[in-house]
């Protein structure tokens, strides 16, 4: 990809915007799909959230000041969209976020975009018991293999705090999986 | 009980499959259709005329307001009663006799009707005793 500043200029210029946005879509749609999928768990919900994310990115490009990287700015939007979606869905159904996630995990066996086994389902169920922030940190570090510095930029949390969150998450998951 | 350690066992993947390229191609196409188009801003002819109409209306209002403004300005040049009284009392050569001469019967009766001067008998007596010239004024 071009130098990021130059690419952002292309995204803001009405003449080059369409082509630049298509390039942005091509580069980020797969990693953002995986990121959102890890949070909302269900493919159809991921599709909706991914669409909302890109629309929000397009609408807010003019407000992007370049203080953070385009990558972390887009991941931040995707994370917020996914969490908002989950909370709204849980509220509408009158259940907790954990119950909603457990329902989604139970439905994974029938999902064509899931080929996991019992251990993977047990791992997802263990993750669902964690507080929201620990879940995010664990998924971004363990599944997506993002660096602490990148997660720090996305979530706006210090690297030290992220390491502590990840450590607590790992301990809780190991304890849960050991008892099962 | 066997202790489970995430670091020691081979990494457990999430199990989520990334959809095939066809899904993302369709996704991109759908999304690009939904994005708001950057169309040039159009200004309607009415919008342009509206400004001109408003300017003409403002000129009319101003033209109508000028006579009343001038009228107000000329009114402010009129001498008010207090200024006139002060002038007669301190500045002019008009004396009491001149004023008395200017009053006719009608003026005197008007003063009696319009001004509610309530004088008690004792007050009138006091005035008559202290002012020697009054007799002269009355005869005048």
Image: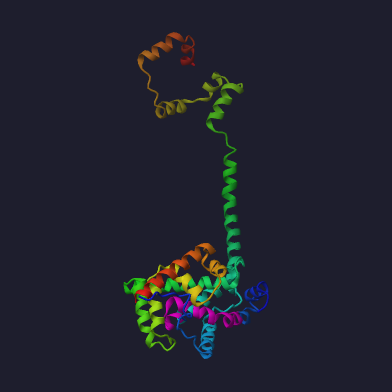
Q: Quadrant of residue B50?
A: bottom right
| In-image side of A165 versus A89 (left or right) | right
> Farthest residue toward the bottom?
B22
| In-image side of A17 versus B16 (left or right) | right
- B45 w.r.t. B66: above or below: below
Q: Quadrant of residue B39?
A: bottom right
> Farthest residue toward the left?
A94
* Nearer to us in this view, A176 or A154: A176
Q: Is any atom of residue A80 visible in this view?
A: no
Image x and y of residue A84, in percent: 43, 71
For the point 46% across and 11% down, the residue is B135
Quadrant location, the C terminus of chain A: bottom left
Q: Which residues are magenta?
A: A21-46
Q: Mainly helix, strand or loop, the magenta region?
A: helix
For the point 43% across and 12% down, the residue is B127
Image x and y of residue B105, in percent: 46, 25
């Amino acid at each position: 990809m071009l130098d990021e500043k130059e690419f952002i200029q292309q995204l803001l210029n009405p003449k080059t915007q369409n082509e630049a946005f298509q390039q942005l879509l091509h580069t980020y749609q797969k990693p953002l799909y995986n990121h959102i999928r890890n949070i909302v768990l269900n493919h159809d919900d991921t599709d909706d959230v991914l669409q909302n994310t890109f629309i929000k990115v397009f609408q807010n490009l003019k407000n992007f000041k370049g203080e953070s990287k385009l990558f972390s700015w887009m991941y931040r939007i995707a994370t917020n969209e996914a969490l908002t979606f989950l909370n709204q869905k849980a509220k509408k159904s009158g259940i907790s976020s954990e119950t909603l996630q457990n329902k989604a995990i139970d439905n994974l066996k029938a999902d064509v975009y899931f080929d996991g086994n019992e251990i993977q389902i047990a791992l997802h169920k263990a993750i669902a018991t964690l507080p929201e922030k620990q879940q995010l940190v664990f998924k971004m570090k363990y599944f997506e293999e993002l660096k602490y510095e990148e997660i720090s930029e996305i979530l706006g949390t210090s690297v030290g705090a992220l390491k502590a969150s990840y450590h607590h998450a790992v301990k809780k998951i190991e304890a849960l999986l050991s008892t099962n | 009980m066997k202790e489970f350690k995430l670091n020691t066992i081979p990494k457990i993947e999430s199990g989520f499959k990334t959809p095939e390229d066809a899904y993302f191609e369709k996704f991109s196409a759908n999304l690009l259709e939904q994005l708001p188009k950057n169309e040039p801003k159009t200004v309607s002819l009415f919008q342009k005329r509206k400004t001109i109409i408003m300017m003409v209306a403002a000129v009319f209002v101003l033209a109508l307001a000028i006579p009343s403004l001038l009228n107000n300005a000329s009114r402010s040049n009129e001498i008010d009663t207090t200024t006139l009284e002060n002038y007669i009392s301190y500045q002019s050569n008009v004396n009491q006799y001149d004023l008395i001469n200017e009053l006719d019967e009608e003026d005197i009766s008007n003063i009696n009707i319009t001004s509610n001067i309530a004088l008690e008998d004792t007050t009138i007596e006091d005035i008559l005793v202290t002012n020697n010239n009054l007799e002269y004024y009355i005869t005048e």
